[in-house]
Image: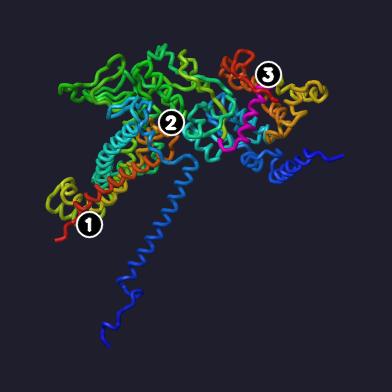
Amino acid sequence: MQPSPRWLLTLPLLLAFTLSGCADESGSGGGVQSIKLSTIRGRDKLVCGVDGKLPGFSFLGPDGTYSGLDADTCRAVAAAVLGDPAKVEYRDLNSSERFAALASGEVDMLARNTTMTLSRDSAGGNGISFGPTTFYDGQGVMVPVASGAQTLKDLDGKPICVESGTTTELNLADRMREQGIAYTPLKFQTGDQTYAAYLGGRCVAVTSDRSQLAAKRSSFPKPDEHILLPEVMSKEPLTPASVNGDPAWADAMRWAVFALFQAEELGITKANVAAKVAEAKANKNLADLRRFLGVEGDFGKQLGLPADFVPKTIAAVGNYGEIFERNVGSGSPLKLERAENRLWNQGGLIYSPPFR
Amino acid sequence: MSATLERIPWWRDRRVVPWIVQAVVGLALLLVITLLVGNLVRNLTAAGLLLSWRWLGQPASFDVAESLIPFDASMPYWRALLVGLVNSLRVILVGLVGATLLGTAMGMASFSGNGLLRRLARVYVELIRNIPLLLQLLFWYFVVFLALPNGTAAFQLPGIVLSKSGLYLAWFAQGLSWQGPELVNGVWQAPLRLSVEFTALLTGLITYTGAFVAEVVRGGIASVPKGQWEAATSLGLHWSASMRSVVLPQALRVIVPGLNSQYISLAKNSSLAVAVGYVDLYSVSETTLNQTGRALEVFLLLLGSYLIIDLLISAVMNGVNQLVQIRER
């Protein structure tokens, strides 16, 4: 019997895998090369850039812990990479600092209600790599009820407060110019200063993402005295981001977030994830579930993550629906509607590509 | 032996050696600079960040709250940066005048015969110069000026209205007619309007720098020998007259060099404007940077602008210094 020449061809391939395996001993990801993933594993902590002062998204509570949708995104990624949602170091960043902090490597990722735009994504612009959008938002305008303003036109000739270094600053200029409304933009460097000037009565209106306005309003002394105008001035897909130069790390972050979406679609929650894993292990016919939960296949390994990264993530923070309701939805002071942020099969935009 | 035979070899010639040393050092310096710049350009090209100034001509598409030169969102970036520069220069120039007047008055007051005035001047200096400027600016803006009433409740004096939206002054309107502030649809209108952001920044800069100027002036006056005071008094001059005609002119040669660095500080400190929402050069640069992503270019422009402003202030103050020096006869 003659040896097949095809068998010989696999030899150098095997050799290559062996060698690459040697080079990447630090990571548990086998063949996946990522400087960022190795760095995160090496320091055993994920450094996550957040806002830190925005209730519902990332807010440092009186007990010293961060809460919110963005903070939970950080936790989910930490659980996926390091197996522990507590291994996150939060870094508060203002709008102007965030991209520099990401580009310089001071933070591993941003989950800082950041709008995905062309110029931020492109290599010739800010050159950052966006993950899946975790909150579909739009720009709105908040006014005091006492001002009697009903539409943007009522703000003609009035000062409007806005945080500098944001997309909202630019959209405001565009929309007002379109409609021919004269106004005075008052720009401040931080959210705190912006809302302090608004509450101080310096501006008759403040503009930002509608979710952020609702979140800030919830921390006002008298939230009932302020309303959001019905106009939505722009699309603001708020999206976690990582650096451009490390595709493997960007993929790991992306699929850790997609896992949250997929878990909601499959009805896997923080409470039942252990039971689902047991069920998948017992029943060999549930192929989809087995692959998703890492019982069979090597999705984790392909991403440079542990095989059971999905159940770890869900056990840590729950699925996307749970995160939403807990932080900004009915279970929170913000009481935002799911609206565009429902799953795709319920009329929303939240959609995970197949885990396959 | 004749002198011509004792020619000094060139490597020991005092007329030649220094030139050679200079040339070698100069060449080495040039080489290092070429190497560094070449390296920088190569790395920036690799990162796709090579300096480019084309963005300066693109439309800025953002508005500014106040401007001395006409501006709207369709104008290019360079125009927006110019608006910021003009606004910066405005607050710097008015601030310099204000800080000088306040500082001189306070510095002189600390030599006053009136004990209350003297102590007030000391309290002012010690209080203001020991609190960070940023805190003071935030205090002036958020605590003092934003607490002002608005509309009909605003503070009104003939020709002057101070409200939450700004300071309104009477001035010549079109046709050279004197026009005072008036309330139109609940909004004050006046020929001369200073925004509350500008007023707060100016107040902060003047009081802060004024305290340092007061100390420089006090030091200058103290440097004048006591005999000069006594001579002036024995001539029958009043305190204010001796100060004005005898002591202050002699103190100026000590005061002016000290003022130079205070003036430069004021110019640099004006970039804290962004904390109180005033549209200065730094504020416009930040928006520009956020939009274009051209960090290196924007910061080069920013550094260059402040460098030039400060060098100009230094040049003017050096000129003034020449004027006030005692002429040796």
* Quarter of the rendering containing residue B277: top left
Residue B291 — which label? Answer: 2
Observer able to see residue B223: yes
Q: Please name the residue that numbered disc 3 is placed on.
A: A265
Between marks 1 and 2 in the image, the one whose residue lies nearer the viewer = 2
Q: Position of residue B245 (x, y in %)?
A: 15, 49
Helix, strand or loop at mark 2:
helix
Q: Residues within 10 Å of mark 1 (few under 14, many from 20)?
A: few
Residue A91 — which label? Answer: none
Helix, strand or loop at mark 3:
helix
> Could you tell whether B128 is left or right of A111 in the image?
left
At label 2, which amino acid type do we have?
Answer: Gln
Q: Nearer the viewer, residue B192 or B304?
A: B304
At label 1, which amino acid type do we have?
Answer: Pro
At label 3, which amino acid type do we have?
Answer: Glu
> Magenta region: which residues?
A243-263
Q: Position of residue A225 (x, y in %)?
A: 46, 15
Q: Quadrant of the N terminus of chain B?
A: bottom left
Q: Position of residue A288 (x, y in %)?
A: 74, 22
Q: Please name the residue that numbered disc 1 is placed on.
A: B225
Q: CA distance from mark 1 to mark 3?
A: 88 Å
Q: What secondary structure predominates along the stretch shown in magenta? A: helix
Helix, strand or loop at mark 1:
loop
Q: Residues within 10 Å of mark 2 (few under 14, many from 20)?
A: many
Count the marks: how many? Answer: 3
